[in-house]
Image (cartoon, coloured by chain):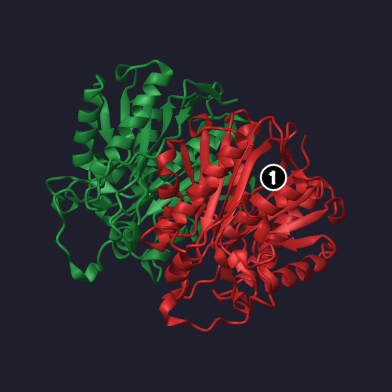
Chain colours: A red, B green
């Protein structure tokens, strides 16, 4: 049973296990530092499909198939699939998962979706509601650019705070017992909106939400950053990461020694300068956590990783109407299992 | 604790209680048969806001405030809010709920969102994960038309199978005990796609998903339609409702005597001919269930209502790319409480 600890945190005494996971990515990500970590690299940006949107569904499906395979599970054994993505009406997920015939919970958490899906899956498993749950998400540079920014053909200049949407997907199978990384706690975040309006500076918009969730989690569990080998944010990028560190420092919380960010890890800032402030998109933390991070915990190189996915809950319409950007951050605590 | 019954159904022995709910709607809905049932009618289609999207957030916020008020709860007492809507990136919900400071789970279930949010909220409460949960959704005719179809100014002709997006919202507070309607079971649906491509015939696209979920629920619980005073679908409308009845008849299941549909209930087909095949949108079942239906159960006029929300998981981009329409239906069983 999930046990509420403090105001916002849920602890899982039985610590549900990630019995299989996969992170897949594209060619640009293959040129980054984590190339050898991904379970599969798509050399073709269209993944053999006729549109970028169909390609995104294909990469999410691929991640799910590989995660199921590693867990040794058939789709028919999964009780719930929890998934979402950045595309309008989350079609990356609905079209990506439609063939599996698994009861489907569509989520919208923007780039926090992997953390949200893992948290809800762990709640379902820990509470006995599900015997096996699946968490999945994806993003695709080309489908995101077309939808959120400019036609690719326009070759728009990128601002110094902009981030590069990762072409990638992550999926994880979560069960009550088994071999694998354990999820021992989770926290679902509140919407934080400090008035940022610049849709090319998501890092700045999301940093306060990440700070809020991390602070809540530390307070609820009466722990401090030293208790975690890594506090890993989703995709704050270079700009948002330094803001997060500064925001928490003001509250007397120093995460400098243990903070990492998937958006800062996935690209080389020097040799991939067009990625500017780092990676972003649901597939950023999705692919990095479900491959690199879970592998390192599994190999006993890492332990006690507080993964906090961050999402900006804007739309192009809201931005065009002069709205500020509401953000959210959801967290799961990952630790070595059996 | 939720108890899995059969393959897909969850039964709730403690039957979480809807301690407060509200359905609000617009002027068009006031001209329909349920006018006196809604908790509030917005006479102004813009709800005093500057855009239809902001207006939609305003109506969802209004439904939430009224549901909280009826439950006698402050936002700070709610552990999780589960909400979603039809707008790109679900901004009706994220902007509508951002001021409440409640941990937020963004959902995407298209027009099935009210049922999905109620089901997940009941799971959270029944499992002890949440002490109090909030389910909410909304839709707005003008924001939906602009996003999915044509500019309103274009005054496009409507096809004989098209439905009218309801301007409305629903919200419900769900707790372990208290006075109100109980949720005694839930079922999360699978994605069903039988190849319908006509985005103006959502009823036909969604009917097979509704049939699948209803059939699963009856099989899992070893019950038949006579055991329910009402099997209530979300927004199949006139076309989808007759298809649902036909599809189930082929499997030897006769729901003709107990079937109702929120989309058929909310408008007068004769005096509101522009609504054509009936109401649709997240706010359709959201507003009808959270006002009319829950009131009738509360007043002991109704009991054992299997509410099955239906959603079409398409996007304009997917339709333009020639894709078929994947659909889903989620259900909750509503019964008289104390």
The picture places residue A187, in percent across and down from the top left corner, at 68, 47
Find residue B115 and report its horizontal and vertical position in percent.
Answer: 42, 39
Front residue of A319 and A56: A56
Q: Position of residue B182 (x, y in %)?
A: 48, 28
**Nearer the observer, B269 or B318:** B318
Asked if residue A285 lies left or right of residue A199, the reply is right
| Label 1 neighbour load within 10 Å: few <14, some 14-19, many 20+ | many
Chain holding disc 1: A
- Does the image show residue B69? no
Q: Is residue B91 visible to the viewer in this orientation of the structure?
A: yes
| B151 and A60: which is toward the camera | A60
Residue A51 to residue A296: above or below: below
At horizontal 52% and vertical 29% (from top left) the residue drawn is: A77
Mark 1 falls on what kind of element? strand
Q: How many marks?
A: 1
Furthest residue toward left: B270
- B278 w.r.t. A208: above or below: above
Which residue, as the protein is rendered here, is positioned at the far bottom? A157
Residue ranking furthest to the top: B222
Res B2 → quadrant: top right
Left or right, residue B59 beside residue A286: left
In the rendered image, residue A81, in percent from the top left (x then y), is placed at: 51, 40
Q: Which residue: 21% across, 35% down?
A: B243
Q: In the image, A266: left or right of B123?
A: right
Residue at numbered disc 1:
A186
Quadrant housing the N terminus of chain B: top right
């Amino acid at each position: 049973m999930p046990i509420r600890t403090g105001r916002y945190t849920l602890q899982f005494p039985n610590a549900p296990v990630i019995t299989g996971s996969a992170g897949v990515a594209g060619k640009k990500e293959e040129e980054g530092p984590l190339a050898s970590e991904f379970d599969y690299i798509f050399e073709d940006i269209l993944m053999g499909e006729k549109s970028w949107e169909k390609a995104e569904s294909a990469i999410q499906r691929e991640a799910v198939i590989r995660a199921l395979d590693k867990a040794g599970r058939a789709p028919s054994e999964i009780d719930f699939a929890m998934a979402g993505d950045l595309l309008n009406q989350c079609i990356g997920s609905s079209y990506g998962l439609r063939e599996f015939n698994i009861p489907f919970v569509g989520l919208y958490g923007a780039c926090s979706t992997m953390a949200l899906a893992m948290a809800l899956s762990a709640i379902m498993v820990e509470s006995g509601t599900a015997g096996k749950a699946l968490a999945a998400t994806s993003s695709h540079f080309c489908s995101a650019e077309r939808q959120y920014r400019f036609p690719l053909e326009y070759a728009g200049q990128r601002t110094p705070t902009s981030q590069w949407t990762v072409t990638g997907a992550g999926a994880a199978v979560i069960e009550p017992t088994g071999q694998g990384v354990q999820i021992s706690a989770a926290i679902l975040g509140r919407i934080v909106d400090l008035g940022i309006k610049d849709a090319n500076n998501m890092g700045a918009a999301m940093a306060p939400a990440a700070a809020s969730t991390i602070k809540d989690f530390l307070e609820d569990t009466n722990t401090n950053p030293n208790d975690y080998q890594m506090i890993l944010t989703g995709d704050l990028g270079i700009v948002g990461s330094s803001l997060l560190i500064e925001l928490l420092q003001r509250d007397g919380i120093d995460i400098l020694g243990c903070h990492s960010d998937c958006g800062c890890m996935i690209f080389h800032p020097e040799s991939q300068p067009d990625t500017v402030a780092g990676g972003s998109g649901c597939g950023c933390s999705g692919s990095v956590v479900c491959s690199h991070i879970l592998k390192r915990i599994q190999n006993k190189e890492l332990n006690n990783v507080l993964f906090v996915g961050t999402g900006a809950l804007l739309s192009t319409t809201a931005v065009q109407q002069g709205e500020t950007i509401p953000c959210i951050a959801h967290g799961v605590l990952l630790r070595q299992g059996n």
